[in-house]
């Protein structure tokens, strides 16, 4: 049981923003990457230092509504232009994430506490192509307006810093967790650029989760619900609404070292966007996704290694790009201690 509990898919909560990943949230920048949490999210970990490396790739596209919002955000559609677009947005993003986590041995509120810091480095290539038509308001009246836009932006650099604090509790096969995290906006970001790595504003994200895990049968089921509050972007005077995200995972351990299963998420914006620069209205977005996963546990010297591969296909998107994404997660953590051995008493009879 200790071996499996040591390898919860590390809660790399609140990774950096993925531009064009969500079409509300300032027309393409959301703090939470859906799929961040996965199987075994609430199970306790071994005390000490844990290191995790993640490779994340996403490929998404969207139509006219998202394209119009993106052009307004970067200043390509001025305030005196009433415009409609027949256009598409496409994005390919590759991120590398490093997460250092310290798990405390001393209980906190009867549970196990952990503190993490996540750093990001990656590349984003985003393009927008299509026809802009409308009317341009001038002092003497208005005139028809039409142009074809073909915009492409690429950026490579560091993302924002993501601290996180979590508490986990175990009661037999039932495991519970709560977390709080947020965004420190220090990553590569320009308000007039189509592609970014950084978010451009701070956030606070918090939530809780549950994992059912039976080491005897190898059955596992996890779900984590969280909410994001977005602070105002001072560069654009735009404030995104409150977001809700639910990540889930279900798996079966075929052996103590091999895990297979499914993962998924639901993402929905609950609050309307606001601020001086809001010209797209409420523009709530949503999306859902599901896909397969496989995991492997193996020794790494006197430590323990865990490799997880998972992929998601998105569907039911509204006001946001839709596509697919894939994750490769490699974790090194302290190995679970061997089971205690009770000394055998020898009774000598005459």
Image (tube, rainbow, N blue to C red):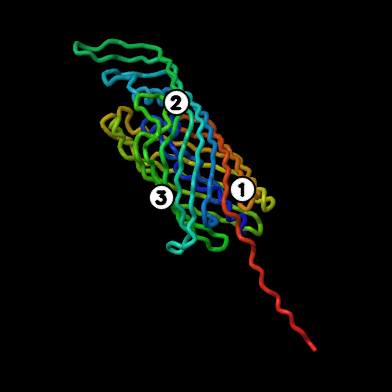
- Circle 2 sits in a helix, a strand or a loop, which is it? strand
Q: Kindly identify which residue carries mark 2.
A: 155
Q: Which residue is mark 1?
A: 305
Residue at 43% from the left image edge and 31% from the top image edge: 197
Q: Describe residue 213's horizontal placement relative to residue 237 as left or right.
A: right
Q: Quadrant of residue 284?
A: top left
**Residue 71 relative to residue 21: left or right:** left
Q: Position of residue 174 (x, y in %)?
A: 54, 59
Task: Categorize mark 2 by other alpha carbons within 10 Å: few (<14), some (14-19), many (20+).
Answer: some
Badge 3 element: strand
**Left or right: 143 as drawn, with respect to 28:** left
- Image-quadrant location for residue 189: top left
Residues under labels 1 and 3: Cα distance? 26 Å
In space, the residues marked 3 and 2 are separated at their CA atoms by: 29 Å
Q: Nearer the viewer, residue 217 or 44?
A: 44
- Name, please, the residue furthest toward the left: 140
Judging by the rendered image, the residue that carries numbered circle 3 is: 180
Q: Residue at x 43, y 47 (%)?
A: 226
């Amino acid at each position: 049981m200790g071996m499996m509990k040591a390898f919860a898919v590390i809660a790399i909560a609140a990774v950096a923003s993925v531009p064009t990943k969500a079409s509300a949230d300032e027309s393409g920048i959301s703090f939470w990457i859906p799929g961040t949490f996965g199987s075994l999210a609430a199970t306790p970990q071994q005390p000490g230092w844990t290191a995790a490396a993640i490779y994340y790739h996403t490929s998404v596209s969207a139509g006219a509504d998202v394209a119009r919002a993106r052009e307004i955000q970067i200043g390509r559609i001025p305030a005196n232009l009433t415009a409609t677009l027949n256009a598409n947005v496409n994005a390919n993003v590759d991120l590398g994430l490093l997460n250092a986590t310290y798990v405390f041995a001393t209980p906190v509120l009867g549970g196990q506490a952990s503190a993490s810091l996540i750093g990001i480095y990656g590349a984003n290539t985003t393009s927008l192509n299509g026809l802009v038509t409308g009317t341009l308001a001038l002092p003497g009246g208005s005139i028809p307006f039409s142009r074809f836009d073909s915009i492409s932006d690429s950026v490579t650099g560091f993302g924002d810093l993501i601290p996180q604090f979590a508490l986990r509790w175990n009661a037999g096969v039932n495991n519970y967790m709560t977390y709080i995290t947020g965004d420190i906006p220090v990553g590569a970001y320009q308000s007039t650029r189509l592609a970014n790595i950084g978010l451009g504003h701070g956030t606070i994200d918090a939530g809780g989760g549950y994992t059912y895990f039976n080491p005897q049968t190898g059955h596992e089921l996890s779900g984590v619900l969280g909410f994001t509050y977005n602070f105002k972007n001072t560069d654009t005077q735009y404030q995104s609404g409150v977001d809700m995200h639910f990540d889930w995972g279900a798996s079966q351990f075929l052996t103590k070292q091999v895990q297979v299963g499914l993962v998924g998420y639901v993402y929905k914006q609950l609050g309307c966007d606001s601020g001086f620069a809001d010209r797209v209205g409420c523009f709530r977005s949503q999306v859902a996704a599901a896909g397969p996963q496989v995991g492997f546990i193996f020794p790494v010297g006197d430590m323990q290694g865990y490799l997880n591969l998972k992929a998601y296909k998105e569907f039911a998107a509204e006001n946001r790009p839709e596509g697919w994404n894939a994750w490769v997660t490699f974790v090194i953590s302290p190995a679970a201690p061997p089971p205690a051995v009770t000394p055998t008493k020898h009774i000598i009879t005459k």
